[in-house]
């Protein structure tokens, strides 16, 4: 049985690496928000620039309302809460001259503008690099177009599945007897987001020597880094890489195998990988199957790989009788890389995850205490856990205009009346 979920609030450090840096976050979807969320956790003040009428794409999936604030489903959308933490939220109408001027005033007081539009969009707003640099020569402009700011696909748009297809990731994903598949998660977006955060920090480090600059991160090129071995293999051998499912290109057994159903999870599996004779011998020690141990088909690594289909069938018959957690412990004790296959529910109750606070809790005014993973790295003197739960929509518009830009109440009222800014969701 897994222990109950124990979400604990993140301790908030006194010092973070990017304290004093301000980021204007114009990003949408997943890749850009991954970058700005990480920058926020690292200490940057991230101002998320919302469109005043921008409701989330999937309000039907809103998390349960737990109060005490008003019941606003758009503030309880899961992805917004996952990728909106460690930020502030303001709403600007950039299609108006006065809204654009507010944005440029913010550029003067900021360090980074980060967006993941197609290349033509910033120009359509009148916010291309020259306009930003004119207001702040030290500004860093990070763009994350799907295919880059040049080339024949410059102005094409895409979400992750399109990048997966174009990069070759979908071609490599699937089983040998099946069609290409979309990867099961947002590898393209996560990879691009992490790369964008890294390149932003690099540009900030160089700013004292070279001043402001543009940073271009094509999402396609980010994902090409993940399939480099396939391209090298094709170049060296002349053969097109094929889909291999859970198999390994040269080792067996290597896969995910069914196990006995657990009390709270009837669909249970274990991952087992043996790449060396020592690992194979460890598996045999735990398996205690004399027939398999003596079978000449499995006597060497090459033979095991050639007969991997037969070996997988025999191994599956055995793993079906075992609890995945118990079997993992026994295999690990014998030196065999193995792990239970964890779903989200299991992860939130896993002792390794809980002990390291890989996932902690953030308290949201409409959702309550909810899980938020922290970055994979740990800094001993300048920790970077999530700072705050995702802000309510446009909750910081007026404070930002007052505190950062020094606007008078009369000017703010005029901007609100003109629809250039908003402190709440505008219905259209």
Image (spheres, rainbow, N blue to C red):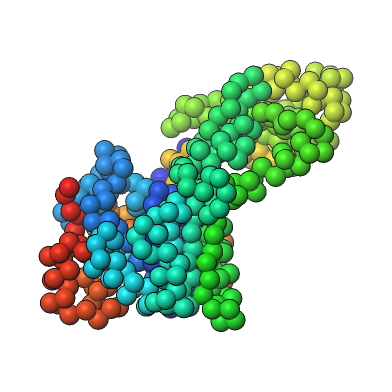
Left or right, 225 with respect to 149, comes to: right
Up-down: is 108 above or below 392? below
Residue at 78% from the left image edge and 20% from the top image edge: 307
Q: Is residue 86 visible?
A: no
Left or right, 298 with respect to 35, comes to: right
Left or right, 105 with respect to 350, comes to: left
Q: Is residue 148 visible?
A: yes
Up-down: is 189 above or below 196? above
* Image quadrant in which you'd find residue 372: bottom left
Left or right, 233 with respect to 426, comes to: right
* Image quadrant in which you'd find residue 333: top right
Up-down: is 216 above or below 267? below
Q: Position of residue 157 (x, y in %)?
A: 45, 44
Q: Position of residue 25 (x, y in %)?
A: 39, 62
* Image quadrant in which you'd find residue 269: top right
Q: Position of residue 91 (x, y in %)?
A: 26, 61
Residue at 38% from the left image edge and 64% from the top image edge: 127
In-front residue for pair 265/228: 228
């Amino acid at each position: 049985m897994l222990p109950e979920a124990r979400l604990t609030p993140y301790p908030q450090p006194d010092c973070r690496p990017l304290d004093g840096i301000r980021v204007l976050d114009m990003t949408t979807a997943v890749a850009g928000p991954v970058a700005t969320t990480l920058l926020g956790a690292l200490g940057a003040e991230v101002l998320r620039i919302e469109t005043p009428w921008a409701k989330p794409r999937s309000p039907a999936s809103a998390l349960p309302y737990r109060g005490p604030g008003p019941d606003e489903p758009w503030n309880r959308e899961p992805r917004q809460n996952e990728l909106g933490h460690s930020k502030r939220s303001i709403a600007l109408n950039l299609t108006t001259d006065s809204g654009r001027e507010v944005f440029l005033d913010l550029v003067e007081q900021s360090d980074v503008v980060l967006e993941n539009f197609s290349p033509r969009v910033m120009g359509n707003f009148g916010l291309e690099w020259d306009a930003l640099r004119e207001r702040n020569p030290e500004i860093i402009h990070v763009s994350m177009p799907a295919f880059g700011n040049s080339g024949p696909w410059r102005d094409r748009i895409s979400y992750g599945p399109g990048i997966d297809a174009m990069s070759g990731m979908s071609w490599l994903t699937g089983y040998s007897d099946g069609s290409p598949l979309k990867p099961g998660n947002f590898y393209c977006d996560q990879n691009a987001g992490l790369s964008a955060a890294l390149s932003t920090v690099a540009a900030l480090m160089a700013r004292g020597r070279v001043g402001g600059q543009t940073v271009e991160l094509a999402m396609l090129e980010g994902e090409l880094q993940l399939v480099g071995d396939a391209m090298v293999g094709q170049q060296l051998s002349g053969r097109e890489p094929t889909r291999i499912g859970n198999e390994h290109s040269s080792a067996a057994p290597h896969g995910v195998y069914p196990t006995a159903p657990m009390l709270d999870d009837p669909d249970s599996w274990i991952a087992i990988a043996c790449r060396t004779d020592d690992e194979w011998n460890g598996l045999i020690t735990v398996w205690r199957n004399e027939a398999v141990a003596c079978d000449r088909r499995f006597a060497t690594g090459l033979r095991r790989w050639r007969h991997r289909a037969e070996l997988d069938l025999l191994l599956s018959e055995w793993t079906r009788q075992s609890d995945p957690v118990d079997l993992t412990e026994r295999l690990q004790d014998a030196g065999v890389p193995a792990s239970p296959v964890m779903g989200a529910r299991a992860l939130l109750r896993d002792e390794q995850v809980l002990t390291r606070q890989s996932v902690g809790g953030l308290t949201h005014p409409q959702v309550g205490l909810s899980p938020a993973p922290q970055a994979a790295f740990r800094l001993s003197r300048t920790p970077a856990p999530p700072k705050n739960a995702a802000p309510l929509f446009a909750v910081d518009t007026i404070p930002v205009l007052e505190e950062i830009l020094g606007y008078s109440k009369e000017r703010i009222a005029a901007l609100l009346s003109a629809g250039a800014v908003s402190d709440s969701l505008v219905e259209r």
